[in-house]
Image (cartoon, rainbow, N blue to C red):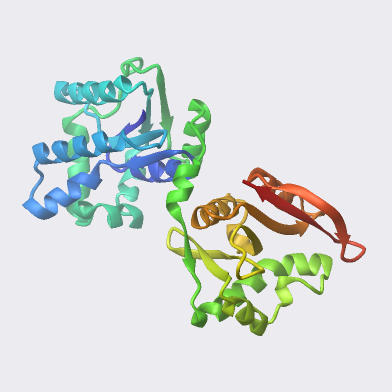
Amino acid sequence: MDLLLLVGSGAVGKMTVGQELMKITDFRLFHNHMMIEPVIEIFGKYEGAVVNKLREDIFDAFMKTNYSGMIFTYMWAFDLQSDWDYIKALTAKFEASGGRVYCVELVADQAVRIERNKTENRLRNKASKRDLVISQDRMIREETKYRLVSKDGEIPFENYMKIDNTNLEPSEVARMIKERFHLPDVSRTEMMNRIKLEEVREDELPQMHEMQIASFMPLYEKYHDEGSPAIESIDRIRGRAARPNRKYYFIVKDGARVGAINVGHNDPEEKKVSFISPLFILPKYQNRGIGYIAIQKVFELYPEVEVWKLDTILQEPANCHLYEKCGFVRVGEEKPINDHMTLIDYELRK
């Protein structure tokens, strides 16, 4: 299990950069205040021993997961031996598991950090910072009392970089870190955790119908296929949904409905051959790997199915790539629909 330390002065942007980095890597964010805020809320004050114990429990449990690594934010006082001891013990824990340790130090002008101390994201996640007068004065006191910026060559890690993010967006900093250390992309495990299938109720079919139109309309305008789901009536959808051997599912990512999928059997008695038709993702969520995960979720829901079938548009290489990535292979003959569009069949046999 790898560990990426994000260190720096107060309000330098450690948590925000960590949030952006979590979006593009297979690392999860554990920012410092995730333990600090609950302890303050419960005890009425900061209790360092309790915070450290809770952190250790999180580290130990997380190291048993399938994620590639953890992002941990920390304000490191380089003139405090206790902070050096803590970092040494923490990194040794991850290295003992065979993991690598990366360290990124963020620095920014104080005037910029004072403004960042007021941002909505910071105040939403850190209740102890919401009294802006106190939190600003505390931030200034901390950096006059402690040395919070390292000296050249002081940080001992092989995988280390210092970034002045005074004028950089958090997403740009995250991209720099990912590219510098060649961090892994978001994994299937992460996406499987974030995406769910929820059966569509009868009263929800109109909403799903609107989503289907929005998703398929660009293809309809391109090919003018009279069999396009973009012009399918709500009555036809209701008829399909009413069949006992067919089901619609919303594709839900992080709590938002981003598409839908219909699966089932043409023959109510047939349980080993099933169809996927249609599958769609709303345009603003496309090209994020959601369709691939939705298909994997369907496979899990129907383990008894031995043959999966679907068709797609030959002239849409991204669609063909998706199904082939899932293990489908082309079968049968091409079916021209008009001068611009041809349907092809795919099958997956387990």
Q: Position of residue 199 (x, y in %)?
A: 48, 69
Residue sitting nearer the eye, 13 or 32: 32
Q: Position of residue 274 (x, y in %)?
A: 63, 60
Q: Residue furthest front?
A: 269
Q: Is residue 18 above or below residue 295?
A: above
Q: Is residue 174 above or below residue 121?
A: above
User: Residue 91 lies in what quarter of the image?
Assistant: top left
Q: Which residue does the image show at 92% across and 63% down from the upper left?
A: 339
253 on left or right of 83: right
Looking at the image, can residue 264 be seen?
yes
314 on left or right of 296: right
136 on left or right of 1: left
Q: Is residue 313 above or below residue 32?
A: below
Q: Which residue does the image show at 43% across and 30% down from the upper left?
A: 163
User: Residue 272 lies in what quarter of the image?
Assistant: bottom right
Q: Which residue does the image show at 60% across and 72% down from the upper left?
A: 211
Q: Which residue does the image show at 18% across and 45% down from the upper left?
A: 36
Q: Residue furthest right?
A: 339
Q: Position of residue 45 (x, y in %)?
A: 8, 49
Residue sitting nearer the eye, 162 or 230: 230
Q: Is residue 308 above or below residue 143?
A: below
Q: Position of residue 15 (x, y in %)?
A: 34, 43
Looking at the image, can residue 169 be seen?
no
Residue sitting nearer the eye, 141 or 338: 338
Quarter of the image where the N terminus is located: top left
Q: How many marks?
A: 0
